[in-house]
Image: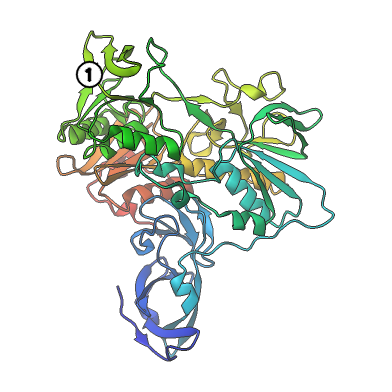
Amino acid sequence: MWKTTQNSDPEDTDELTAMVCLESDLQDGQMKEVEIGHHSVLLTRHEGKYSALGNQCTHYGAPLSQGVVSGNRVRCPWHGSCFNICTGDLEEFPGIDSLPCHKVKIQNSKVYVTVNRKDLKQQKRIRSMGGAVPGVAHTILLLGGGIASLMCAETLRQEKFGGRIIMVSRDHLLPYDKTRLSKVMNVESDTIVLRRMEFYHQYDIEVWLRKEVLSVDTDRKTVAFDDGLVQNYDQLLISTGCRAKALDVPGTKLRNIMMLETPEDARQIHAACMGSNVVLVGTSFVGMEVASYLLDKASSITVIGSSELPYQNTLGREVGRITMMMLSEYNIKFYMNDIVTEIKGVNGKVKEVVLKSGKVIPTDVLIVGIGSIPNSAFLQGTKIQMNPKKLVIVDKYMRTNVPDVFCAGDLATFPLAMAKNQLVNIGHWQMAQAQGRVAALNMLGKETELTSVPFYWTVLLGKTIRYAGYGEGYTELVMKGNIQEHKFLALYLKNDEVIAAAGLNFDPAVSAVAERLSSGKVITKKEAQSDDLRWLQMS
């Protein structure tokens, strides 16, 4: 970090000015972390113009100076959020807030940055938003209280839509950070709520909680709810997501069989597993995170998976093997290529799990994480097109086949730009956000295609595996680093091009790959196999 020379301004002034570098110290496409008033500021240069922004990503506080610069934006090294380096505006999720901007001036070949003391204390900035305008009768109805609906609502207000916005959720909580549930399971709901109720009031976003949709009439443009209310709409977003899939075997009515969907579920699992023997069915991202979280809490942990290795269909065999090895070192037992056929109990409470192989595993708590079911039953009988899995089909503008009806989030199957517009369903947090934003822009007639590159992360044993791209159907894998030392970069190839990357302790490589894929620049097999990794550097 560059130390700066404070130029002026005593403590009681609102602004602080400091000389941060010589004009020649920074070239186009470069960035530096500088310290002003004991706070970290990101100094960048693009097309000869200097900019100064907050250096902490608004998502989880990662130092952006360790990220990747490409053109006029910087990408976070941890989770892939992108910010415009000229304005500080958020351009790619999972962050939801923008960065504060600071004044820069050049004088006598020296670069000076002036910061407002309030901005130094607040590392996040909400983009300018409007509210409802009297006399505008247009109503946009958002079904679902998740992140896609929230981003749709915020984007509408950022674009100065002045009509009525109604967000409807069957939950009793305002939209919250669902990615935290499997990582910090004793979480208090209040700590993961994304926006307070005051926010919704300030920007005239109506939120209806504890209300479930029963049916949609796209001819009359009405939605019926479980309390008897029928609401008209002009435009509709369907983002009701998916719910956890239950086991379909004898014994599922026993107590202490749990699934993770809400903060209350997370707290109950945390409490039930303290000092208990735990069996976890499913080797998805969430399942592995729960197993990792319970390591120092449960008496024993057993994982049952239907495939040979965890993540086999997503991150591939090699990364799955690493994950299994990491967790096995902490005495987590794995029974792979097996399934549960029966659950036995005593006094109404689960006591044993019977596997297809004949193995019987004693347990006090059974946690089920075997996939999800679309919340789309209320769409049966409508004109809205769904695929055989009951997912809603949309185009690259998040439009369904019915005019004025959009869909976003886990319920949508959509054309993925980086996969030659192949129809896919990706249940990533960041993709749901991007889809909500794109839906909002197209509702307003601002034609915008979904171009985001999927970005995901999972936390195991305090270490984060990051993933970018879409690796389904990959035919070759190139590994960099040292697997045994838990430091690697996996590059997934198809047709001699990199289509995805996963990394552990290899920052900011995965973000660099995401940025390359986002810019449409091909990463060749030759580059992937090369020991020279300078191709990861963006500018």
Closer to the camera, 306 or 24? 306
Across and down, in percent, residue 57 comes to: 42, 60
Location of residue 483 in the rendering, given as x and y in whole percent from the top left corner: 18, 40
Q: Nearer the viewer, residue 106 or 103?
A: 103
* The N terminus, quarter of image: bottom left
Q: Is residue 44 above or below residue 397?
A: below
The colour scheme used here is rainbow
Query: Can residue 94 be seen here?
Result: no
**Is residue 352 shown left or right of residue 61?**
left
Please, is residue 251 above or below residue 106 in the view?
Answer: above
339 sits to left or right of 470: left
Kind of element beneath mark 1: strand
Which residue matches tag 1? 362
Image side of residue 91 versus residue 235, left or right: left
Instruction: Tell me the crowding category of disc 1: few under 14, some 14 to 19, or many 20 or more residues within 10 angstroms, Cα based.
Output: some
Image vertical order of residue 254 relative to residue 193, above or below? above
Residue 526 in sight here: yes
Q: Residue at x 47, y 55 (%)?
A: 82
Q: Looking at this rendering, what residue extends furthest in the front direction?
A: 347
Residue sitting at x 49%, y 59%: 83
Q: Residue at x 63, y 31 (%)?
A: 212
Name the amino acid, label 1: Pro
**Which quarter of the rendering shows the C terminus?**
bottom left
Which of the 4 quarters of the picture holds residue 266?
A: top left
Instruction: Count the numbered circles shown.
Output: 1
